[in-house]
Structures are given as C-alpha cells and as structure tokens.
C-alpha cells in the first residue's frame, strides 16, 4: 500500500509541474491588453479548476451554445458537466481584474491531448467568450495560443468540431486556416446531413512528436510523454 501511495504522490507532483510550467513558457500570451480588454490568463487541469469557475464555464457554454447544439446532437446538462470535470480536460481561462484581489472570468478554452494512431493531437473541445469580450480579437488570440502550445509540444495537428449553425465560429476558423478533416461524420438514414463538421489545422511536426509514437492508453499518459 505504501508503494502505491508513493507512486500516486509522484504522479501528482508531475501533474503540478505541468500546471505550473506551461504559461511560463509563453510570456507574451499571459496577458491580453487590446480593444478595451485587460485580461490575464491562467492554465488548469480539470482537478485544479476552481468550482466557481467550472460553474461559470458551464453556464456560459449553455447560454452560448444550447440552441446551436440542438441543431446537431442536442444539449444535455449532465454531458457537458462530465466533459468539464473529465481528468484529461485542460483549460485556459482569461480573467478581467474587477478590483484588488478580485477578478472575473471572461473566456475559456477547453482542450485535450489525444492520440490518433500513435500521433499526438491537440483537440479544442470548446472556446467560449462572454458577450463583452466578443469581436475584440480575443477568440483569435486564444486559438493562436493553442496552436503555439500544440506546435511547440510536437502535436501533428489541432482539431475541433464546429456546428454548421455556428456560422460566426466557422468563419473565424476559416480565416485561421482550418479546413475539413478527411474523416467526417456520416449521414444517418432518416436523419439528414450531420449538423457539425470536423476541422483541422496541421502543425509542423517537431522532435517531441517522435516520443509519442509508442503505444499510449490515455491522454494523461500522452501528455506526460509530450512534456516528459
């Protein structure tokens, strides 16, 4: 029992190291001070995401996306809550400073490291902004930061799913160079065309990607290989 406890402690220490170190590698992306916004970024694993921030993220996503989700696979509160709390979930959260010692979340990106035939992929699950932070370049900034993280880590590509009804998001991704992935959802008989599209933007493969080619069983193991 003592051996298992020690191993778990070592794993938690490695996880904390990743959480602490990631943003330090990107000083230019720790702040967003443009177009009337003055925001600071924080990075979290799901287990370290404050409960009030998780609650806010769920509420924001539901407000922004419930109707759009219902044009594709439908919205379920429990499904979204499970996604936000999944151990493999990673978050970038942009905060606005309200007063000394007090801040308010304004936007977040939920992403994960995934494995596709031994190749590391960075998958963007959600990018959500409060109305006051929209159309001010923040979404583009966060996506470019995500791409930089993926490129530096040796990810083969950044992938995401966009609802066809979400025309504003689709337009932004097109401007950023995202194209349709070769694997698309098939039309189900009697249900019409799928309401979503899988997009991708390929990254320049870096040396760290080669370390991820050995078999992996989950995204946390993949992340440890990438940053190991």
Image: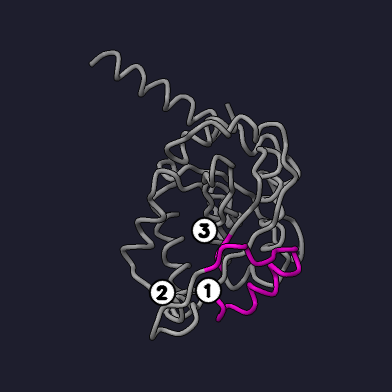
Which mark sits nearer the N-terminus, 1 or 3?
Answer: 3
Mark 1 crowdedness (10 Å alpha carbons): few <14, some 14-19, many ≥20 = some
| Residue 139 picture quarter | bottom right
In magenta segment, residue 228: no
What residue is disc 3 on? 125
Between 153 and 168, the one lying in front of the other is: 153
| Place of residue 3 in the rendered image (x, y in percent of width and height, measured from the top left) | 30, 14
CB contact under 8 Å: marks 2 and 1? yes
In magenta segment, residue 182: yes
Residue 73: image tag: 2
Distance Cα–Cα, label 2 vs label 1: 9 Å
> In the rendered image of this protein, does residue 92 appear above or below residue 217?
below
Residue at 55% x, 81% y is 165
What residue is disc 1 on? 196
Q: Is residue 37 left or right of residue 198?
A: right
| Place of residue 228 in the rendered image (x, y in percent of width and height, measured from the top left) | 57, 26
Residue at 35% x, 24% y is 8
**Element type where label 2 sits in the image:** loop
| Place of residue 38 in the rendered image (x, y in percent of width and height, measured from the top left) | 69, 57
Q: Nearer the viewer, mark 2 or mark 3?
A: 2
Residue at the limit of the structure toward the top, as seen here: 2
């Amino acid at each position: 029992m003592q051996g298992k406890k020690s191993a778990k402690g070592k794993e938690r220490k490695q996880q904390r190291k990743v959480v602490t170190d990631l943003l330090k590698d990107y000083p230019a992306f720790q702040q967003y001070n443009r177009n009337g916004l003055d925001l600071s970024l924080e990075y979290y694993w799901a287990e370290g995401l404050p409960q009030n921030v998780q609650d806010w993220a769920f509420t924001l996503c539901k407000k922004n996306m419930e109707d759009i989700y219902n044009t594709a696979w439908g919205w379920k509160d429990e499904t979204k809550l499970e996604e936000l709390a999944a151990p493999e979930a990673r978050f970038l959260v942009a905060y606005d400073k309200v007063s000394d010692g007090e801040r308010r979340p304004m936007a977040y990106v939920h992403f994960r490291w995934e494995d596709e035939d031994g190749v590391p992929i960075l998958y963007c699950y959600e990018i959500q902004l409060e109305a006051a932070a929209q159309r001010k370049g923040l979404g583009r900034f966060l996506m470019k930061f995500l791409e930089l993280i993926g490129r530096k880590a040796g990810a083969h590509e950044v992938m995401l799913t966009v609802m066809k009804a979400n025309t504003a998001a689709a337009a932004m991704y097109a401007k950023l160079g995202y194209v349709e992935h070769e694997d698309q959802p098939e039309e189900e008989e009697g249900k019409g065309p799928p309401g979503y599209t899988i997009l991708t933007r390929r990254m320049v493969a870096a040396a760290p990607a080669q370390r991820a080619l050995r078999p992996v069983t989950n995204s946390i193991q993949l992340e440890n290989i990438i940053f190991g």
